[in-house]
Amino acid sequence: MSNNLLITGGAGFIGTNFVRYWRKKYPDDHMIILDSLTYAGNKINLQSFFDQDNFDFIEGSICDQNLVNGIFENNKINRVVHFAAESHVDRSIEGPDEFINTNIIGTYTLLKSAYACWRNRGTSNHLFHHVSTDEVYGSLEATGPPFSESSTYKPSSPYSASKAASDHLVRSYHHTYGLKTTTSNCSNNYGAYQFPEKLIPLCLINILNGKPLPIYGDGTQIRDWLHVDDHCRGIELVLQRGAYGETYNIGGDNERKNLDVVTLICKIVNEFFAQSPELRHLFPDSPCAKGADSNLLVTFVKDRLGHDVRYAIDASKIKRELGFSVSISFEKGIRDTVKWYLDNQDWWMSILGRE
């Protein structure tokens, strides 16, 4: 039986990859994408689907109650996959208002519309899935156990605090009103279509342009990295078999120091340049074009405010209960990601041109 999915933030990084993943596996489902196309959203990511009868793109804000109400009422929505969020920690420190508005008020707006619509229709065939982050748990000690679904919330930035609030709102609508909800908290994602401000694409593009690779502090902060395709598979499992009201942590079992991640990117980019003389002509400012090691660009900068030391996800629950497993190794995933950005220069150059 086909579903009518509302996917918020579908033109962003993870949302785009999920839409493309879901479209390939479930072509009969009607997909309605709602995205406000802020700096991190790119309509062109989904352009190949626009001429399909059961695919609709709506530009608008999840905070617009009338718009959201109309989408639910006019499209018989029975599944929500909620990606839309402001997500960059540095931006949340500089200007938290947008994070409070989008991540908290926006989630509340969606929950109100979903509950009103599904209650009025008397439908039991519904699900509101909320996509969140491991950052709601705060920072781990270097040798502490990874975050589990029962870990205490200790958000450290306006971004993570706003996501923590949205998690609680989703759970409250399940426990108070009986809304069928699930939540997933993921570790750091990487892959195609990621906005260039994030660590991996930022470092790659800076190498190509011969610009410094900024490393906060001493670069020993640890993150658990998850390929976005594995994340999409994890969400699929939760949508298909997750228990209502439950939270599932989706992690990559792949803890890496930030400096080690950057070093690996440098190594892979060096190899691509060695194998492709064309890259040396396309990016003459890169040290690789002159046969030098891109690692020379590493520059240590003052650590950011409230920088969490370590994130790590215990994904044993989703493995045990839903059969999740990571399928893409970090080394292969980074190599594939670097290749994607090299093959899709027009995509990120157009984004940088409008910044």
Image (cartoon, grey):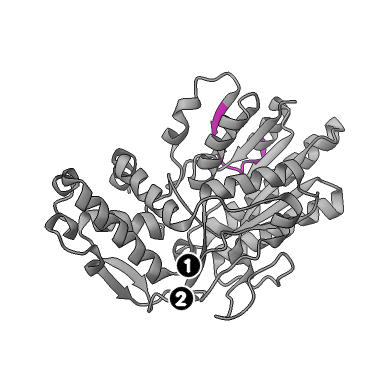
Picture coordinates of residue 330, whole percent (x, y): 46, 57
- Around disc 1, counting alpha carbons within 10 Å, would you say few (fewer than 14), some (14 to 19), or many (20 or more)? some
Position above or below: 281 against 121: below
Residue type marked 2: Leu
For label 1, the SS is: helix
Asked which quadrant contains residue 353, the reply is: top left
Picture residue at 52% right of the left edge, 49% below the top: 228
Q: Nearer the viewer, residue 63 or 320?
A: 320
Q: Earlier in the sequence, mark 1 or mark 2?
A: 1
- Give the magenta range: 56-66
Q: Which residue carries the number 1 mark? A: 93
* Residue 61 on the magenta segment: yes
Q: Secondary structure at mark 2?
A: loop
Q: Position of residue 82 (x, y in %)?
A: 63, 45
Instruction: Tell me the amino acid under the disc marked 1.
Output: Ile
Check disc 2: other Cα within 10 Å, few if <14, some if 14-19, many if 20+: few
Q: What residue is drawn where x is 39% and y is 49%?
A: 337
Q: Nearer the viewer, residue 193 or 229?
A: 229
Residue 40 falls inside the magenta stretch: no
- Read off the residue under disc 2: 305
Mark 1 and 2 residues: CB-CB less than 8 Å, in contact? yes
